[in-house]
């Protein structure tokens, strides 16, 4: 079953026509990676799904239901978690408060999920009473992921989770994502090809605001020419 | 041991039953000690405040303290918008003025003291609720600057109404309603007795402080603080930012209105300039900034500093005519406070205390 489907998505930001025809399909239970050079439109794609831009054309379907023209908060309520590129931790709130703010329901199931997430990210336990603004980059990333998953989240959109992190932290985040993928479908935007190739089942290559290539991750690993052409790596 | 979803199944358990992190449990013991100390300090402060009318007989001091309490509530309501939600308003005084005029007009036109008083409160809550909801719905969808300008415009309309509707409000001259204030409200409150009014204002401040504290630490309060930090992020977590901002706007509006009711009882006079003017919003903004934006105690300290310094600076005019320009002196005081307390008095002290605590911990 397809969890998320995008057909011919065009997004305008002010006077700029950023996305000029993005097509994408995320099968349920998969990790689908969006790849492309800087400025290709990867982050805009993920933010368009969350409804951050008013000026969009095309079709975005989540479990066959249209997300077009829906406000961001209703999109999130449908069960789409979003981890932004710069984590966006609430700096003035503690780790505990950041988690509590994210809870749409404070029921047993939600606290069970929080417990599970704290097992996944033990660093958050030790920083439980610390303000978001005083966390390290890695802790912020963990908190941002945990916060997005504390509610029932069938689909997680995650934007460059390895950005700015030390290699040890990237490993920790990857380890956690390997666990998360078993219960959550993931759409991942990632520049770090090592991480993308290890986690991804499928990939979509975006260039100049358009989908230019897609397929299984193995296909990309086998095709050096394609990697060189669109990612500049051998 | 690596935690996997297979181990957890769908119940999201990972064999770790210790939900409460270790540092938190340790922290609670420490907090308990400091909490007891804090409580004792608060009880002493409250006892002293309740004893003031027994120790001070001079009405001018009681009047000054009463006004500090009332302005504190007004500043706390403004702080809910600015400090806890990140909204700047230039028209917050309209709610204060509505409260003050409601009390003044009912005192003047309704013969029964009790009925008039309750009607004033009912009118204030009702009008402030509806008005803040409408102003919020009109402007909070837009950028914060639009909200500031729309509140300024609506507040100006209220000033004009108060100026022009002379038969009801006596226009710019305003009116004094000392003669019609009840001397035995509910059989035991004399609104002309400064001590009684002092206690009303003190109890009002304590009640509003506790309500606000509860509100700030409730799920709604936490969400408002998150909105202040990052609106877009709150929306992407599934919360309607507009609805939460409306709640903040309504609570702040009603709170300011009630402060206006008590202020009218204290000053026994209303005019557009004394309770509705834009400069009243600027005063309350100054109090919030001086005390510390986004702190619970900040507005109270700010109101104290502003009221006491303007009271004494005004009094210096008897010593030398240069002090007639006391507003300039007050400007100097304000600049000095901003220089030495950039996050406001309470905010800066909090920051310094916390950084000292952190340094102490790192030395250990």
Image (cartoon, coloured by chain):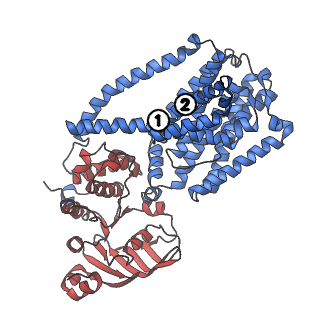
State the residue position of label 2: B305
Q: Is residue B91 visible?
A: yes
Determine whether, in the image, residue A142 is placed left or right of residue B169.
left
The numbered dot on residue B345 is 1
Viewer-side residue, B114 vs A90: A90
Residue occupying image coordinates x 62% and y 19%: B62
Q: Is residue A163 above or below residue A225?
A: above
Q: Quadrant of the C terminus of chain B?
A: top left
Give the Cα distance between marks 1 and 2.
10 Å
Report in which chain the residue with disc 1 lies: B
Structural crowding at the residue carrying mark 1, measured as other residues with C-alpha within 10 Å and reported as few (<14), some (14–19) or many (≥20): many
Q: Position of residue B314 (x, y in %)?
A: 65, 28
Colour of chain B in the rendered structure image: blue
Residue lying furthest left in this view? B1
Upstream in sequence: badge 1 or badge 2 = 2
Q: Secondary structure at mark 2?
A: helix
Q: Is residue B317 above or below residue B213?
A: above
Determine whether, in the image, residue A167 is placed left or right of residue B306.
left
Report in which chain the residue with disc 2 lies: B
Q: Secondary structure at mark 1?
A: helix
Q: Look at the numbered discs 1 and 2 and tell me whether their residues touch, using CB distance below 8 Å.
A: yes
Colour of chain A in the rendered structure image: red
């Amino acid at each position: 079953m397809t969890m998320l489907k995008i057909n011919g998505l065009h997004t305008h930001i002010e006077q700029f026509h950023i996305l000029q025809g993005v097509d994408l399909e995320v099968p349920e239970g998969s990790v689908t990676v969006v790849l492309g050079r800087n400025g290709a439109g990867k982050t805009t794609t993920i933010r368009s799904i969350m409804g951050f831009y008013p000026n969009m054309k095309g079709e975005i379907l989540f479990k066959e239901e249209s997300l077009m023209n829906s406000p961001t908060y209703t999109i999130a309520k449908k069960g789409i978690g979003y981890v932004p590129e710069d984590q966006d931790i609430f700096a003035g709130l503690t780790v505990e408060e950041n988690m509590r703010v994210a809870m749409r329901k404070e029921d047993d199931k939600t606290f069970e999920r929080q417990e599970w997430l704290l097992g996944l990210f033990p660093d958050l336990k030790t920083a439980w009473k610390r303000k978001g603004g005083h966390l390290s980059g890695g802790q912020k990333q963990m908190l941002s992921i945990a916060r997005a998953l504390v509610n029932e989240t069938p689909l997680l959109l995650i934007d460059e989770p390895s950005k700015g992190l030390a290699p040890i932290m990237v490993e920790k985040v990857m380890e956690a994502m390997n666990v998360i993928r078993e219960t959550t479908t993931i759409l991942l935007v990632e520049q770090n090809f090592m991480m993308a190739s290890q986690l991804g089942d499928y990939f979509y290559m975006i260039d100049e605001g358009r989908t230019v290539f897609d397929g299984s991750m193995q296909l990309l690993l086998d095709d050096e020419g394609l990697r060189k052409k669109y990612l500049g790596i051998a | 041991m690596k935690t996997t979803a297979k181990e957890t199944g769908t119940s999201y358990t990972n064999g770790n039953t210790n939900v409460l992190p270790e540092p938190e449990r340790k922290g609670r013991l420490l907090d308990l000690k400091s909490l007891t100390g804090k409580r004792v300090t608060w009880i002493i402060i409250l006892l002293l405040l309740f004893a003031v009318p027994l120790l001070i007989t001079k009405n001018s001091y009681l009047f000054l303290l009463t006004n500090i309490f009332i302005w504190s509530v007004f500043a706390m309501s403004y702080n809910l918008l600015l400090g806890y939600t990140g909204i700047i308003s230039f028209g917050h005084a309209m709610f204060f003025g509505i409260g003050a005029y409601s009390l003044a007009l009912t005192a003047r036109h309704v013969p029964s003291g009790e009925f008039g008083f309750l009607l004033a409160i009912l009118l204030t809550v009702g009008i402030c609720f509806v008005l803040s909801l409408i102003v919020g719905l009109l402007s909070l969808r837009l950028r914060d600057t639009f909200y500031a300008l729309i509140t300024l415009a609506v507040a100006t309309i209220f000033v004009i109404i108060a100026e022009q509707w002379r038969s009801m409000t006596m226009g710019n001259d305003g009116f004094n309603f000392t003669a019609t204030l009840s001397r035995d409200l509910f059989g035991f409150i004399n609104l002309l007795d400064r001590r009684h009014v002092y206690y009303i204002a003190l109890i009002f401040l304590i009640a509003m402080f506790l309500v606000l504290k509860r509100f700030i630490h409730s799920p709604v309060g936490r969400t408002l603080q998150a909105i202040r930090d990052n609106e877009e992020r709150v929306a992407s977590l599934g919360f309607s930012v507009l609805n939460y901002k409306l709640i903040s706007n309504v609570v702040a509006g009603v709170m300011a209105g009630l402060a206006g009711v008590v202020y009218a009882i204290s000053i026994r006079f209303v005019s557009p300039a004394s309770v509705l003017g834009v400069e009243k919003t600027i005063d309350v903004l100054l109090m919030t900034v001086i005390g510390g934006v986004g702190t619970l105690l900040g507005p109270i300290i700010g109101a104290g500093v502003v009221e006491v310094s303007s009271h004494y600076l005004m009094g210096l005019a008897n010593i030398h005519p240069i002090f007639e320009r006391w507003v300039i002196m007050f400007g100097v005081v304000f600049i000095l406070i901003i220089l030495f307390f950039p996050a406001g008095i309470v905010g800066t002290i909090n920051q310094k205390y916390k950084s000292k605590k952190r340094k102490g911990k790192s030395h250990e």
